């Protein structure tokens, strides 16, 4: 069964994401309210999927995603944010983020996106040349 | 876009491979014109190019050493055009129409919707 970590400063949003992730068959094994905790959470649990908010106290989601993907390019991150800024979305895509879910979202669309990210092959770690 | 040397998937706008540093747009040594990797002759001055093979070789060497580098591939080397008779296959390659460029999905400057984002990231639409 796939595992997931939710990083969002809103407890309400975390609860909604937990429900959706459970519906796609994922077990939520960790939650955090700031990007500063993301790397430690990932290294502790090695989840199959991370949902990551952008505007949070402490480290923002884009910085946290860049930091994590630099160390662990195989990490599967789906950004979940109300921020529809072109430069932020493109920065996430270039960094290797798997998808970007705009809030407020349709739960059915969120399910599709989480399934898509879970089924996608892992990024090749840096330096792992064939 | 896949790197011809290490096969890593790169964003089409990249000039160098993120995995091995392979140069995707070798510049002509003689005039500095940025050519496509597949070009055999410079689009700026007509010099023969040996960049693609050189860059690939350099990238393959780096990949083989197992130490990824951010440094760009070795500078392309311009070579004198062949003085002998033209090989028909060389001529065909020279005048062949350029391969279709893959369209890069992009985002509007404002009013970005989930559909726009789905097009960029693929799947789940």
Image (cartoon, rainbow, N blue to C red):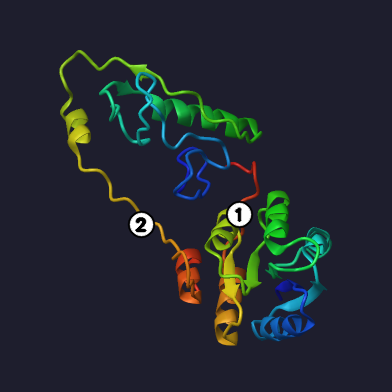
Q: Residue at x 59, y 41 (%)?
A: A129
Q: In the current view of this chain or complex, which residue is farthest to the front?
A: B110
Q: Nearer the viewer, residue A39 or A86?
A: A86
Q: Nearer the viewer, residue A98 or A24?
A: A98
Residue under circle 1?
A: A95
- The CA span between labels 1 and 2 is 20 Å
- A90 is higher (above) or lower (below) than B91: below
Crowding around mark 2 (Cα neighbors within 10 Å: few <14, some 14 to 19, many 20+) is few
Residue under circle 2?
A: B103
Q: Secondary structure at mark 2?
A: loop
Residue B95 figure quarter: top left
- A114 is higher (above) or lower (below) than B98: below
Relative image position of residue A51 (x, y in whole percent): 69, 71
Relative image position of residue A41 (x, y in whole percent): 82, 64
Q: Chain of mark 2?
A: B
Can the viewer see residue B125? no
Q: Secondary structure at mark 1?
A: helix
Residue B46 - label: none
Q: Nearer the viewer, residue A83 or A78?
A: A83
Q: Residue at x 35, y 18 (%)?
A: B30
Relative image position of residue B80 (x, y in whole percent): 29, 14
């Amino acid at each position: 069964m796939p595992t997931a970590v939710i990083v969002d400063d809103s407890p309400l949003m975390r609860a909604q994401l937990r429900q959706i992730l459970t519906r796609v068959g994922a077990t939520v094994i960790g939650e955090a309210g700031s990007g500063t905790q993301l790397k430690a959470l990932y290294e502790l649990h090695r989840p199959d999927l991370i949902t990551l908010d952008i505007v949070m106290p402490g480290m923002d989601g884009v910085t946290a995603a860049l930091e994590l993907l630099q160390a662990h390019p195989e990490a599967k991150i789906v950004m979940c944010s109300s921020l529809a800024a072109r430069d932020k979305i493109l920065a996430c895509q270039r960094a290797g983020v798997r998808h970007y879910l705009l809030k407020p979202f349709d739960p059915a669309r969120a399910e599709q996106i989480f399934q898509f990210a879970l089924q996608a092959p892992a990024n090749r770690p840096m330096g792992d040349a064939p | 876009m896949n790197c011809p040397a290490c096969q890593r998937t790169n964003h089409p706008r990249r000039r160098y491979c993120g995995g091995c540093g392979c140069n995707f747009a070798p510049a002509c040594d003689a005039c500095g014109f940025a050519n496509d990797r597949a070009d055999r002759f410079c689009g700026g001055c007509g010099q023969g190019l040996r960049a693609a093979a050189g860059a690939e070789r350099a990238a393959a060497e780096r990949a083989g050493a197992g130490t990824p580098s951010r440094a760009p591939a070795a500078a392309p080397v311009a070579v004198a055009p062949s003085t002998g008779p033209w090989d028909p296959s060389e001529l065909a390659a020279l005048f062949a129409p350029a391969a279709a460029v893959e369209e890069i999905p992009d985002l509007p400057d404002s009013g970005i919707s989930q559909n726009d984002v789905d097009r960029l990231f693929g799947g789940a639409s």
